[in-house]
Image (spheres, rainbow, N blue to C red):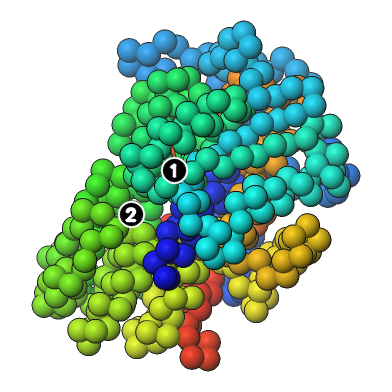
Amino acid sequence: MYRDRMFVAAVVLALTATACSGQPKASGGDPTPGNTAASDAPSPSIDPSTGATITPSAVAATPVGRATRSGDPKIVVTPPTSKSGVPEANLFTGAAITQGITKNKIMLCAHAGLTLASVFGNDPAQLEQTYWRMVNEEMGGVYGRSVEFHYEDDGYNPNNTPKAFTACQDRKPAIMIGGIGFDQTPTFRSLAEQNKELYIHGFATEKGTSNLKYSFGAAPSVEHMGKLFAQMVLKKAKGKKIGILTVSSDGWKGGADSFTSELRKLGYSAAIPRYEIADNNQVLTQHVVGLKDAGVEVAFINTNVVAWSRFVTEADGQQWHPMMVGWGFNLLTETVGQVMQSFPPSLGLSASPVYDPQTKYSWSAEYTRMQSYYKKYWNKSDPNDIDWIQWIAMKAFHRMLLDCGKDCNRNKIAGMMLSGYKGAEPPNCTLDFSRDPKHRVGGYLTNLWQTFDRGDTQAWKQISTCVAGF
C-alpha cells in the first residue's frame, strides 16, 4: 500500500518548484535548523494586495531586446509599457494575450498524477482550493481578481499526458503548470509548444529545449541537479566508492549522465558501476546484487521515491547497507524509515524546504498558517507534506502574479521570465531566469536534507538551505 502513497507524493512534490522563489543563497557552511545564510534579496516593501510587509521580487526594469533561437521567429521583449514596469513579450496576439485573465478572474490549470490521492487523505479538492480560497476570501484575490486553480490527472504516465493537456487547454488558462513527473513534463512541454500555451513546470531534462518559446522551467533541470548531487557526494562522502541506480528513460538519465561527468570533472577516477531500470516499477533484485558485488559504498538513487523505497527493502534483505543519496521526499522515511535505521544517514536534495512540524525552522510559522486554514476550511488538523508542498508552490505563484501587476497578461508573464525575472517568496528558493536563458530555466538552488533517528524510525532534517553548490 505504501507504493501507492509514494506515487501520489512524487507527482505532487515538485509543484513547489514550479514557481520556486524565496530564500537567499547560502554562503558556505551548513545552517542549523531555523537559520539561513545571509540574504541577497531586495529590501522589504508592502504587499499591494494585503498591506503586509514582504520581500519583493526583482523584475528587470530595462528591456533585454531579443531572445532568439536558430530557425525561430524572433521573440521581442519590449520596454515596460505599464505602471507595473513589467517587460512585455510578443508571444501572444489578439484574445490569446489575456486568455485566462479577465476583469474578475485568473484561471490556472496544472497536471499531476492525482489518481490515488484520495486513498491517503489528500483530497484533490483540498489541494486545489485551500491556498487560493484563503487568498480570494481574505485578501480579495489578486488585485481584485479571484484565482481559480484546477488539477488534471496525468496518471503519472506520459501516455496519459495528452489527455491531461487537452483537459487543461479546454479551460483556457492563463498559465499551464507542471508538477513532478520527469517523463510526463517533456511530453506536456512538447504539447504546450505545439499549441502555443504558456507553460511553467518543475524538474525536467534539458533535452529538447533548444527551440522552446512558450515553456519555462522554475526548478533546476535534471542535469543541473545531477551536478549538485555529484558535488554533494564528494564533499560528504569523500573517499568512498560510488555507484548509480537510474531510470533509463530520457526524462531521467540526463541526471545520471551529468552526475558522472561532474564526478570526473572534480577528479573522481574510480570506476562508477551503473545499473539502469526501464521504469520506476522494475524489480531491483539484480541491480542491488550488482552494486553490492561491485563494492559500492555510496549509492546514488536516481529514481522516484517508489523505487528508492523498494531499493531500501531489497538492500536490507541482502544485508547490504550502503550510504544512499537521492531526491528528498518525506514519504521515504514515513514508509521505510524503520528499515533505514540499519543504513548510514541518507542525504537528499530537494527544491522544497523540509516538512517537519516537530523541529523549529525559520519557515515553521508558515506550517502553522497552513494548518490553520486546513482546519478552518476542511476540519483537517494534520495536513501532511503533500499539502505543504502544494501550499508553498501556490504561494510562489501568488508572488509571480503580484509581480506581474494589475494589468498582467500572458505576454507580461512571459516577458518577466525572458527579461531575467528574479522571484523571492519564502520559504522557497530564489528564482533567477537570467542564469540559464538557453534552457529557459530559473531554478538553480537546492536544499540539503539528512536522515536522523527519531524513536523507532528515521526522519529528514534540513542541514543546508538554498545552496548553489557544494
Which quadrant of the view contains residue 100? top right
Q: Position of residue 88 (x, y in %)?
A: 62, 18
Instruction: Check disc 1 and give the amino acid type.
Output: Asp
Q: Looking at the image, can residue 52 be seen?
A: yes
* Residue lying at 31% horizontally and 45% vertically, measured from the top left: 251
Q: Residue at x 70, y 41 (%)?
A: 398
> Up-down: is 53 above or below 103?
below
**What kind of residue is marked 2?**
Gly
Instruction: Quickly name the residue at label 2.
Output: 226
Label 1 packing within 10 angstroms: few (<14), some (14-19), many (20+)? many
- Which numbered mark, 1 or 2, is in the foreground of this view? 1
Q: How many marks?
A: 2
101 relative position to 468: left or right: right
Element class at badge 1: loop
User: Could you say which quadrant of the image residue 99 lies in?
Assistant: top right
- Under tag 2, what secondary structure? helix
Outermost residue on the right side: it is 51
Label 2: how many Cα within 10 Å (few below 14, some 14–19, many 20+): many
Q: In the image, residue 78 lies at what x, y percent?
A: 61, 14
- Residue plotted at (65% across, 50% down): 125
**Camera-nearest residue between 300 and 59:** 300
Mark drawn on residue 102: none
Reply above or below: 40 against 48. Answer: below
Query: Which sits earlier in the primary sequence, circle 1 or circle 2?
Result: 1
Q: Most extreme residue toward the bottom, as rendered?
A: 455
Instruction: Look at the image and tell me in which quarter the C terminus lies.
Output: bottom left
Residue 212 x %, y %: 40, 25
Residue 419 position, x and y percent, is 56, 26
Disc ID at residue 154: 1
Residue in the foreground of this view, choosing between 419 and 154: 154
Q: Residue at x 34, y 84 (%)?
A: 343
